[in-house]
Amino acid sequence: MKNKIIFISILLLVIMISAVEIYAADEVRYIRGIEIDGNFDDWDGKPHIIDNEDDIRSDWLNFTKVGYFADDQYLYIYAERLSSKSFYPWRFNVVILNAKEGKQRYDYIPTKYEYDDKDKYYQPTRYRKRKYAQFQISTDYSYYRNKKGTPIGISFNGKKIETVLLDSNSNKRIEFKLPLDKVGLDKENIDVKFMIKSSFDIKSYRKGLYPYDWVADGKPIIITTGPTYWQISSIPFFIMTIFIVKRKYRKGQETENSSKETI
Amino acid sequence: MAREILYVVLPCYNEEDNIRKLVEKWKNEENQLRKKNIDLSLVLVNDGSIDNTLNIANSLGALYHSIEVLSHTTNLGLGEAVNTGINYVISQNNKGLLCVMDADLTHSPYYVHSMIDKLKEEGLSCVIASRYRRGSKVEGLSLMRKLLSSLARIIYTFTLSIKDVRDYTCGYRLYETKALMDLSKKYNGKIIRERSFACMMELLFKFDKEGFKIGEVPFVLKYQLKGGKSKMRIFKTANRSLMLIGKLKKLVNEGII
């Protein structure tokens, strides 16, 4: 029995460690697969967050899905919204929560949301105020469908840094990449912690509702290039559990032996 | 008193019969403008003409130092031509005035004096040469065109209702360059997005939205002087205008512009 427990424990440990390695390897594979070219197929099966639709009134500012990746140079983002009208622009910020450089703007980040039945709306009930580095993403509105592609302007803390041109026929989806050296996260194996904040929504504001759509609601998106803290901390926890089980088993054996001896 | 520059932007598409005559007419007004401490600068924007317009414009540019010739390689539409002219004037960084008019001889440079006076006396940012003021007249236009213009006027008045404006579509206007500079900053260097003739309405709408004061002076539109065929496709323009009103209203409602 003792040998059986040791064998099962080692087997579980091996499976767990190999799972951690696969996770890290997957990240690298994904990053190589993304190109900012207006072809969104390479985002299929990649990590993403589905955002609530009842957290802002204007469709053009309402995020429905956000995909994400990072390598040691860029943060890659894919965003989808409710509105598909071609003349609406894109206007939002990418707030980097763990930036090591360029922290210039104060922001109130909602940390808790509650559903308001009356307004049918997710309203933040708790915020955290801190200075954050922010990328501003914007496209111009247009009355015409741009056949060559939509130019996306990217600024960092108000200064224009680059413009990428991509094809987005319906104007419902967008993809772009942000240079991580601006926020000091451009080295290998550094986690990127960020949130996406829509532009001010006048429709929600007029109705007395919270006028920004954040992704994700109440919690940041974390991209990790190695095993997470949870995965690392679970290994000693697992060993400790095995140790306790083993001790209990041994105690049970000893009690059984002593009762046999008494008989 | 500091001298000012009056930039006259003339969008030209196949205007070989008219451009030289129009430049001469402007040159006749030059002396009177000088008396008002205003220097004249003509900006000819060739919008991909397929006739001799560009050659004539270049020869006029070589003859007069106050003429600048800008050219699109392909026909991009009135909106883009006006944008090109406005951006050129803004790039000169001179505070002054900018006049836009049709280059087909239907608009006479003579009215620019009353427009300048009105703009200065009333502290306006835009003055329109209006077909719908006391003293205005429309000559040589077919009944059908007159009816359509009146219909457009009624629609614009009900939907846009800009204070002190009756003529929303006339292309003969005088702007303060400072106001255009402010607008250009707001719209990332591209004030006009509409390419068709409806662009004049878009520009006016944005002026009003920004809180700039607009006024009108009467003028006589002499359509019989027009050289060459009309470039306006009536039903396409009407359709674009109606769609544009809807979109502009939506963009304002969403807080985008």
Image (cartoon, coloured by chain):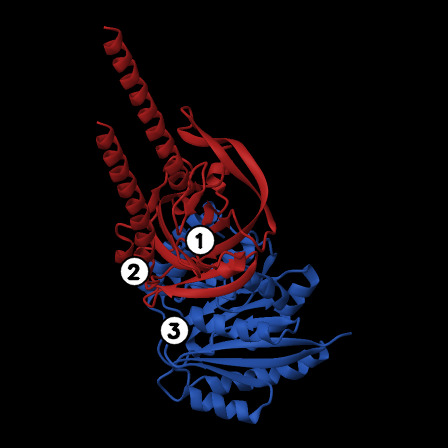
Chain colours: A red, B blue
Compared with A236, A153 (above or below) is: below
Q: Are marks 1 and 3 on the same chain?
A: yes
**Closer to the camera, A258 or B124?**
A258
Instruction: Give the quarter of the image for residue A89.
Output: bottom left
Q: Which residue is mark 2?
A: A33
The residue at 26%/50% (across/down) is A45
The chain letter for the residue carrying disc 2 is: A
Instruction: Check whether the beta carbons of the residues at disc 3 and disc 2 lie within 8 A of each other.
Output: no
Residue B60 percent across, percent down from the top left: 52, 90
Instruction: Check whether the beta carbons of the residues at disc 2 and disc 1 lie within 8 A of each other.
Output: no
Is residue B111 in sight in this rendering? no
Q: What's the CA distance linking mark 2 and mark 1?
A: 52 Å
Is residue B155 in sight in this rendering? yes
Closer to the eye: label 1 or 3: 3
Residue A226 percent across, percent down from the top left: 39, 50
Q: How many C-alpha atoms fall within 10 Å of the one at disc 3: few (<14), some, or many (≥20)? A: some
Q: How many C-alpha atoms fall within 10 Å of the one at disc 2: few (<14), some, or many (≥20)? A: few
The residue at 30%/22% (across/down) is A250
The chain letter for the residue carrying disc 3 is: B
Residue B75 percent across, percent down from the top left: 37, 77
Question: Is the N terminus of chain B in the top left, top right, bottom left or bottom right quadrant?
Answer: bottom right
Report helix, strand or loop for mark 3.
loop
Q: Which residue is mark 3?
A: B76
Q: What's the CA distance linking mark 1 and mark 3?
A: 25 Å
Compared with A258, B95 (above or below) is: below
**Closer to the camera, B220 or A188?**
A188
The residue at 45%/65% (across/down) is A163
The residue at 59%/52% (across/down) is A103
Q: Which residue is mark 1?
A: B156
Q: Are marks 3 and 2 on the same chain?
A: no
Q: What's the CA distance linking mark 3 and mark 2?
A: 38 Å
Q: Amino acid at mark 1?
A: Tyr
